[in-house]
Amino acid sequence: MSGARAKKTPLLRDAILPLVVLACALAAWEAAVYFWDIPSYVLPAPSLIAATLVKDRAILFASLIVTLRTALEALALATIGGVALALLISRSRLMERALMPFAIVLQVTPIIAIAPLLLVYLAPAEAVLVCAFLVAFFPILANTSLGLASVDRSLVELFDLYRASPWQKLVLLRAPAALPQFFAGLRIGGGLALIGAIAAELAAGAAGQGAGLAFRISEAGYRLDIPRMFAALALVSLAGIVIYAGLTALSRLALVRWHESARGLED
Amino acid sequence: MTVGVAEPLVSLRGIGKSFANGVAALENFDLDLRDGEFLTLLGPSGCGKSTALRLIAGLATPSAGVIDWRDSAAAHNIGFVFQEATLLPWADVFANVYLPLRLAGKTREAAAPLVRETLALVGLADYETALPRQLSGGMKMRVAIARALVTRPRLLLMDEPFAALDEVTRFRLGDDLLAMKQRLDTTIVFVTHSIYESVYLSTRILALSARGGATVDAIDIDAAIARDEEFRTSSEFAQYCRRASAALRCAYGEELR
């Protein structure tokens, strides 16, 4: 009995409390709009935003799917590319010196500055995908590299003592040891992929092309359709939450047996 | 070859080891390791004890001198226990002990009897599926010892394995280690800071000086003495400890009194 109660308390605190706060904030917002009679083109009430979401659902949810799919495709490509390059770099110092500067240049150049150029060379959908890929790539590369490089020295020596092949060292030691850092990189990359996709969609939207959520935001902005802007913004948040929650669950699933980072709530 | 004195398992002759930063851990270091002995290297931090172990294990190469093995098969079957248990945190106890056999290409099925037997030997038969984080420090060290013994090495090298454990656990592990040694007929080289531990466990103690690892004193302890509580409280034990203590003080650079 007491065990069940002890388990219930954190759930109550962690899930219900934020929802109550959210409900209160929305109610206050609704009341403020009603009380001061704020016009919807200045600040739409939450109820109007919800109604807009329902009314424009066909167009908005189609855009949500486009943005979410672009971000996830870019994340998948960034994962493959980032892990592959991290493995290559971990095999040789020369590779690291040759390739890392380019990865860093890409990382420090703001994606919003690259997007217009990519839109010149590529179709809008492709340009958005490439932008999202570029921003998600670096954190996955950097974190996986760090994970592969920071394996316990004594364990490496143990594998040396038993004459392990490079392949055995990778599969049995370095890859599992790098998983926590890899997943940290993946979670950052997931959030950034969405930002990259949104930034590129905004740039594409400025050119009057596109189908994603950010395009809907700029499109609605031109028409001063503020409720729809808010509705699209809510869906962008939802996309971010879906990506973050999905990756957190994946990371937890992979690490919960042994790694402290995934065990916080259990002990 | 002198009749009656067995050829050493491994001989280190004129061994020097300096690191890239110019520090010389060992200078002109000699050691004859006798088959079946329990040799303890006793000395201050940085005297080259661990370096000597790593050279014997082949984890480092000497800058000077030769390491001569009587039997090259023994050179390729060495167990090593580090100061920390250094287990794979994601793998259970069985998988950790199975690791050396896995690296040698043995299947899990083929290795299972040997892994189970070794786990029973260290007293962890019931913990096959436990993860390292679920074990106490002493139990983790038992897993590390099982992993080192699973290949049935002729030589077991132990680098301050009990340094992080409490005294009761140390005593118990020491006794169990001696029982395992007898059962498997393993030669052991043990590195420690502890005088009492070295006297209780060893058949020979080499006290090494703080610089370059020169042998300050070599103390033979009669292997026939039973290692038990009685020995630990005997006057003989106290005498050995006094001599080892004097050697250690000398190793630190004080006068031998």
Image (cartoon, coloured by chain):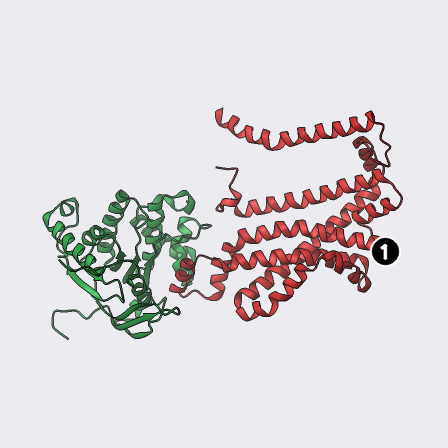
Chain colours: A red, B green
- Mark 1 = which residue? A207
On what subunit does the disc labeled 1 rest? Answer: A
Local SS, label 1: loop
Closer to us: A15 or A41: A41
Closer to us: A161 or A214: A214
Residue drawn at x 80%, y 52% as measured from the top left? A202
Residue B139 x/y as whole percent:
34, 46
**Type of the residue with mark 1:** Ala
The reply to whether residue B37 is in sight is: no
Residue A185 x/y as whole percent:
60, 53
Extreme-front residue of the structure: B254
Q: How many marks?
A: 1
**Residue A16 horizontal side relative to residue B20, left or right:** right
Closer to us: B93 or B53: B53
The reply to whether residue B157 is in sight is: yes
- Badge 1: residue crowd in 10 Å (few <14, some 14–19, many ≥20): few
**Residue A160 horizontal side relative to residue A103, left or right:** left
